[in-house]
Image (spheres, rainbow, N blue to C red):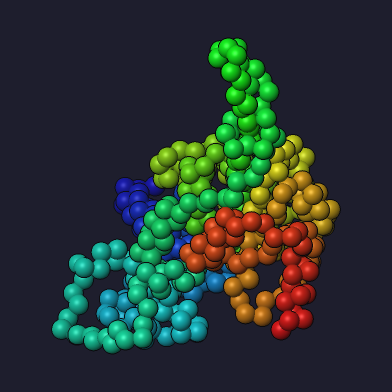
Amino acid sequence: MTEREEGQDGRLVANLMHFARTLRTAGLPVGPGKVIDAVAAVRAVGITNRSDFYWTLHAVFVNRPDQRPLFDQAFQIFWRNPELLKKMMSLLLPEMSLDLPQDEREEMLRRLAEALHPHPEARETGETEFEFDAAMTFSDREQLQSMDFEKMSLDELARAKAAIARLRLPILDRPTRRFAADPHGARADMRATLRAALRAGNIVEIKRKSRRLRPPPLVVLCDISGSMSRYSRMFLHFMHAITNDRDRVFTFVFGTRLTNITRYLRFRDVDMALDKVAESVADWSGGTRIGHCIADFNLLWSRRVLAQGPVVLLITDGLDRDVGVGLAHEMDRLHRSCRRLIWLNPLLRYEGFEPKSLGMRAMLPHVDEFRPVHNLDSLADLVMVLSAPAPRRLNAAADMRMGARAA
């Protein structure tokens, strides 16, 4: 390779790195491994044809159909399409033509604009002035509370993570098998009474005791597959907050395999904790084998973490690559081993949602509650539910049937 070719290759690698960084900042799951794959693919295919170059990078960086519009716009802008670049630099971003619904188009363009220009105060804004009528509108904080994690911009995601870090999970205390000294207790503590009598002489004061109260353990099983990637990153911040707020919290993530990340989330620094998690988890944004992973949990971990009647949070959309094979049996075993099994599903936010997939149908009869989890309000509702006394144990399928009859 000549010196000139080496220089061109170096510039190409640097540009690919910057392009991958832009995609990651805009919300695509792009890591160092994909950058290496992109460099190798471009070297193999070449850059003589723009269409070949586009589809080469598309094959590396795009995993799902919903990522393609964002990749397409980023490619056209980053790799010097003068028309789109001119439009992107202007303030009229929503006018760029995309074959998407209006709200999704504006959201995607806002994320891409922030990725390309992380410091909006440095851009020229011209003389345009805008006036807003604040009557009958919600505050910015209220909008952030109800906004879907999937639709948040980078700044809103940062504020949401800060709000999640302040969450506390006061799970209702439960009586244990042990007793503690209590002057108003219902039981007489004969051992403490005899010790006090030996010290006091003839005067004997009856000592009393009552059952010790303690919150039950909390076990979190979080799906990190491709369909859950945007939500799972926010849930990791939630799990880090509750792990550092209380004891006996056990956290697992799963995609095609099960990984225990409890000890990594005990780091006080959330960035360090998530770096450790990223190093230990090998199946980010891949497929989902819910039945296989829950079977591994029941076999390897249930006796260790389910022995004291914990509350189990199962965070997944229920989309199983194995189409529910063996899932009903493993969910039944998990349900019988815990005090309360709550399934958190971001798909439940859609009006008229119905569990049509085989995996969802296999899971639903074996959970106590079926709740949405897609924004800060839903996390706050979850905190309230866990802080209240547990209702009479019914499965979520019966609850949905009762709700359908009432409707």
Q: Where is residue 21 drawn, in percent x and y?
A: 39, 57
Image quarter where the C terminus lies is: bottom right
Residue 207 figure quarter: top right
Q: Where is residue 101 drawn, in percent x and y?
A: 50, 84
Q: Can the viewer see residue 77?
A: no
In the depicted structure, whether residue 301 falls above or below residue 221: above
Given residues 107 and 159, the one toward you in this image is: 159
In the depicted structure, whether residue 403 falls above or below residue 394: below
Residue at (32, 51) in percent of width and height: 7
Given residues 20 and 261, the one toward you in this image is: 261
Q: Can the viewer see residue 366?
A: yes
Residue at (68, 34) in percent of width and height: 187
Please give the count of numbered marks on the rendered protein. Answer: 0
> Which residue is farthest front?
202
Horizontally, residue 37 falls left or right of residue 339, namely left
Q: Where is residue 349 drawn, in percent x and y?
A: 59, 73
Q: Where is residue 369 drawn, in percent x and y?
A: 69, 62
Given residues 19 and 262, the one toward you in this image is: 262
Residue 374 figure quarter: bottom right
Residue at (62, 49) in percent of width and height: 220
Residue at (48, 42) in percent of width and height: 244
In the depicted structure, whether residue 375 falls above or below residue 312: below
> Which residue is farthest left?
127
Horizontally, residue 405 falls left or right of residue 80, namely right
